[in-house]
Amino acid sequence: MSIRIYGISQCNTVKKARQWLAEQHINAEFIDFKKIPPTVADIQFWLTQIPKETLINRKGTTWRKLSTSEQQNALSSDEAAINLMTNQPSVIKRPVLVNNQRVLVGFDAQQYTEFLA
């Protein structure tokens, strides 16, 4: 069983998720977006289970720095959303947890418990 957690090491939510996993003795491979940006294939796979409106972090600084037309464009098509997320991975809601071909976004201890059961 290969569990992967994607995010940015400085992100507080990612830190909480990684700490929770460690406390549960769950071994998860951490992929830092800053060092290894997600591929188009990664994002396409995530979008099969998570709507782009959820996967794109619309509360973050990266999103707020985009123009209104860039934001509307990203939400109007999967192709534009994928393009934005590959070029600016910090716009992706974190962390992205992948386990057995299933995807979960964000961190909530109860959700993680159920997801990894």
Image (tube, rainbow, N blue to C red):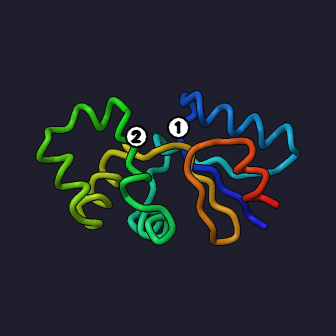
Query: Image check: 105 left or right of 93?
Result: right
Which residue is labeled 1 in the image? Answer: 8
Neighbourhood count class around disc 2 (C-alpha, 10 Å): few under 14, some 14–19, many 20 upward:
many
Alpha carbons under labels 2 and 1: distance apart: 8 Å
The number of discs equals 2
Which residue is labeled 2 in the image? Answer: 90
Residue 49 in the image: state x and y as whole percent.
51, 68
Which mark is first along the chain, 1 or 2?
1
Q: Is residue 6 above or below residue 90?
A: below
Residue 14 found in image quarter: top right
In this view, the residue in front, 6 or 102, is: 102
Tell me the amino acid under the disc marked 2.
Ser
Residue at image point 67% right, 42% down: 108
- Quarter holding the C terminus is bottom right
Neighbourhood count class around disc 1 (C-alpha, 10 Å): few under 14, some 14–19, many 20 upward:
many
Where disc 2 sits, the SS reads: helix
Residue 70 in the image: state x and y as whole percent.
16, 47
Q: Are marks 2 and 1 in contact (CB under 8 Å)?
A: yes
Residue at image point 63% right, 67% down: 102
Residue 109 in the image: state x and y as whole percent.
73, 42
Q: Is residue 30 above or below residue 80?
A: above
Query: Image check: 38 left or right of 110?
Result: left
Tell me the amino acid under the disc marked 1.
Ile
Residue 95 in the image: state x and y as whole percent.
57, 45
Residue 67 found in image quarter: top left
In this view, the residue in front, 44 or 112, is: 112
